[in-house]
Image (cartoon, helix red, strand yellow):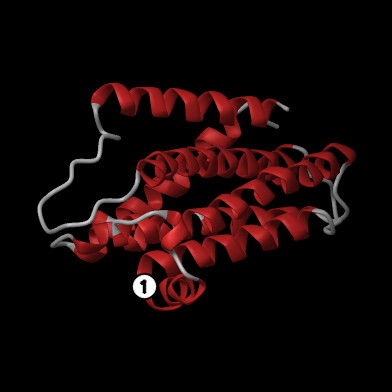
Amino acid sequence: MLLAAAAVLGVGVTLLLLASSGSLSSVALPGLSTASAAVTWAIPAVKVIADLAAVATVGCLLAAALLAPGHRRMSVAGHRWTRMSAWPAALWAVSAAASAPVQLADFLGTDLQVVSGRGLWSFLTTIPQGQAQALVAVLTAAVAIGARRVLTTGGSLALLLLALLAGLPPVFTGHAAGSGSHQAAVSGLALHVIGVLAWAGGSSPSC
């Protein structure tokens, strides 16, 4: 319930700020197609939901693996945190999957209705941005499934590491990947993402 409220509030605030700054206004240029308003608004909305779900997932697993560990089998509190992490992890997976067609429509400068199954498959398998979202969806789905099955503290720790890893694929397709100091920029941003996820998840009341 708290995660859902945070997601709604986060999406609302983000869209309000972007709308007031004019960032969501599409300006058509001669000879270039422009994505529809629905696509322009959907991109930040899906991004905010994915980020909030990522923080909640890492926060729950951090509590289970490090703040309420058992000896071999997880403690009662650790079991509760681990099971609870399945919900935001599933939302994270759905958000990553939903962002793929939205990104493709934005790249093509069109509406979601024009995106075909063949085009989406090509985007997910051959384009770095699509591959990154597909990998995030697979990793987070694995976390969601694993969170309902693991019974040991080691299992919770493995899921925590997997969740942190799921935050990295978009790093390798962002602006840092195309910078002059490619390796240093990507490595620095990857460490930053992991640190932010761990810090925000550990201090979040979502779980």
Judged left or right of residue 140, residue 190 is: left
Residue 103 point in image, percent of width and height: 39, 56
- Decide which of 7, 145 is in the foreground and name it: 7
How many residues crowd mark 1 within 10 Å: few (<14), some (14–19), many (20+)?
Answer: few
Q: What's the residue at 10%, 53% (across, down)?
A: 30
Residue 187 point in image, percent of width and height: 32, 59
Judged left or right of residue 158, residue 195 is: left
Q: What's the residue at 74%, 53% (across, down)?
A: 156
- Determine the image quadrant of residue 201: top right
- Decide which of 176, 12 is in the foreground and name it: 12
Q: What's the residue at 69%, 57% (across, down)?
A: 143
Amino acid on which disc 1 is placed: Ile
- Image quadrant holding the C terminus, namely top right
- Image quadrant holding the N terminus, namely top right
Residue 29 point in image, percent of width and height: 12, 49
The residue beneath circle 1 is 127
Report if residue 133 is visible in the image. yes
Residue 194 point in image, percent of width and height: 46, 48
Q: What's the residue at 81%, 46% (across, down)?
A: 83
- Decide which of 62, 180 is in the foreground and name it: 180
Report if residue 168 is visible in the image. no
- Decide which of 111, 5 is in the foreground and name it: 111
Q: Residue furthest left?
A: 30
Is label 1 in a helix, a strand or a loop? loop
